Amino acid sequence: MKVVGFAGFSGSGKTTLVEQLIPELRLRGLRVSVVKHAHHSFDIDHPGKDTYRHREAGAFEVVAASDKRLMLVREFEQPAALSVHHLLAELYQGVDWVLVEGFKDSDLLKVEVWRAPEPGQVAKPVRYPEDDFVVAVATDAAGSLPQPTQLPLLDLNQPAQVVDWLIEYGHRFEYNWELHGGLVPCAPQ
């Protein structure tokens, strides 16, 4: 399993880029999973649905499955600070690539997403000068970066080229389970 993070300020285009990379990787016959950092309380379940009712009744976990989908919702009694590595261990190990959105402070290799400011706006700072885990910058304005870099510059508007780069350097993104506490991924079915 290869794992790459995408980090950047809100509005930089992380979600759009990840959304565009998924079909590009799939076109090459690769299975893709996504890990997304969510803020505070979020819901994927809707009031009135059976799974929602079970969770509201106090179930710690609710798993629902059909022949097309599996969903797991886990409620924590106390706030839990899960690392990206805990979330990766929840994934199916038969996946080829995991695209991680957010977790900007993680120790995963990542692509920084940086967009040029709109006229009248101030440019957002960049992370790559201080973050040794940033291995490339995806941007729509390479000539406008706030600080020069020797890192590869990827065109934010060319997802196929970003995928070409990821595949070319895929060996760098191979996830090492032993390095991250020996967590073990879900076994393939």
Image: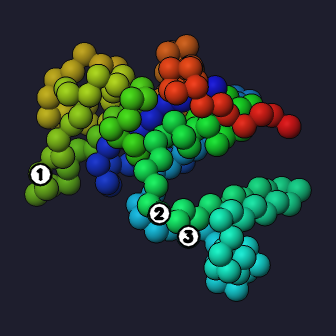
Vertical arrangement, residue 176 with respect to residue 63, above or below: above
Where residue 108 sits in the image (x, y, percent)? Answer: 43, 29
Crowding around mark 2 (Cα neighbors within 10 Å: few <14, some 14 to 19, many 20+) is few
Q: Reading the chain from its start, which is encountered first: label 2 or label 3?
A: 3
The answer to whether one can see residue 23 in this image is no
Which residue is tagged 3? Answer: 43
Mark 3 to mark 1 CA distance (whole Å): 33 Å
The amino acid sitting under disc 2 is Gln
Where residue 188 sits in the image (x, y, percent)? Answer: 80, 34
Q: Reading the chain from its start, which is encountered first: label 3 or label 1?
A: 3
Residue 78: mark in rendering: 2
Tell me what residue is drawn at x 86 percent, y 60 percent: 66
Q: Secondary structure at mark 1?
A: loop
Which residue is tagged 1? Answer: 122
Q: Quadrant of residue 140?
A: top left
Tell me what residue is drawn at x 69 percent, y 58 percent: 72
Q: Quadrant of the N terminus?
A: top right
Where residue 76 sits in the image (x, y, percent)? Answer: 54, 62
